[in-house]
Amino acid sequence: MHVLEAIEVSKVYAIGDRRIPVVDRVSLSVLAGECLVVAGSSGSGKTTLLSLLSGLDKPTSGRVRVLEKDITDMGEDELAPLRNEGIGFVFQSFHLIPSLTALENVMFPAELKGDLAAHTKAQSLLRRVGLTDRGGNFPHQLSGGEKQRVAICRALINDPAIVFADEPTGNLDSSNGEAILSLLLELHRERQTTLVIVTHNAEIAGLADRVITLQDGKIALERQHAP
């Protein structure tokens, strides 16, 4: 089953009289449980494409389907529950809430949907990533690698069908980056979660099921890796 589809998706920004295409007629589909890497150099349109696929931004033209729902024209009221329950996000800059502890940050998406088991699930996830003793710490008391592990737990707490990760190792040193990458892929395999990673890191791309490379907003190359 395809859990994610883009049909001739474009994003054009207008600056004065100029029209700047950032994503240019991209079509792709992603299977349930697949790990897809979107690669390309800086400015190739990777992050914009991720924003369009995940409903964080709207395309100028084309259609986007997520979990068999056309989200292209959905308003925020319809998108919010879909994003909270069906989609997880891991960002380069962590995006943790500074006033909440690590445990509370992980619990937050589950509490939003009224999950009474939020506390238990959050504790279990923190234990899984080796942060049992850091649950009471605030983000400013955590290292970069610890913050990203908390962010991964938060992304997974509602057991989403799809996790989008935008340069998840970009703000980490190489050893922390490798650990985070291993963790993401391990959890993806354990939970059979569909994983879409934006990166320019060739090592990450080598571990994916499939890699698409963007250039000037278009798919320039697609590689399928043997299982």
Image: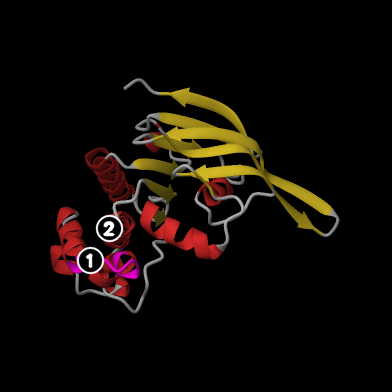
Q: Amino acid type of disc 1?
A: Ala
Residue in the image at 51% along x and 60% along y: 78
Residue at 31% from the left image edge and 76% from the top image edge: 100
Q: Which residues are magenta?
A: 110-119
Q: Position of residue 8 (x, y in %)?
A: 65, 36
- Callout 2 environment at 10 Å: few (<14), some (14 to 19), or many (20+)? many
* Residue 204, x across and y down, in percent: 38, 37
* Numbered circle sitting on residue 28: none
Question: Which mark is drawn over residue 118?
Answer: 1
In the picture as drawn, the residue positioned furthest to the right comes out as 17
The x, y position of residue 146, in whole percent, is 26, 61
Q: Residues within 10 Å of mark 1 (few under 14, many from 20)?
A: many
Looking at the rendered structure, the kind of residue marked 2 is: Ile
In this picture, residue 33 sits left or right of residue 91: left
User: As drawn, is 74 to the left or to the right of 25?
Assistant: left
**Mark 1 to mark 2: distance in Å?**
8 Å
Secondary structure of the residue carrying numbered label 2:
loop
To which residue does mark 2 refer? Answer: 157
Secondary element type, mark 1: helix
Q: Are marks 1 and 2 in contact (CB under 8 Å)?
A: yes
- Can you see residue 215? no
- Up-down relation of residue 21 to residue 143 (above or below): above
Q: Residue furthest top?
A: 226
Q: Is residue 49 above or below residue 111?
A: above
| Residue depicted at x 75% and y 48% | 20
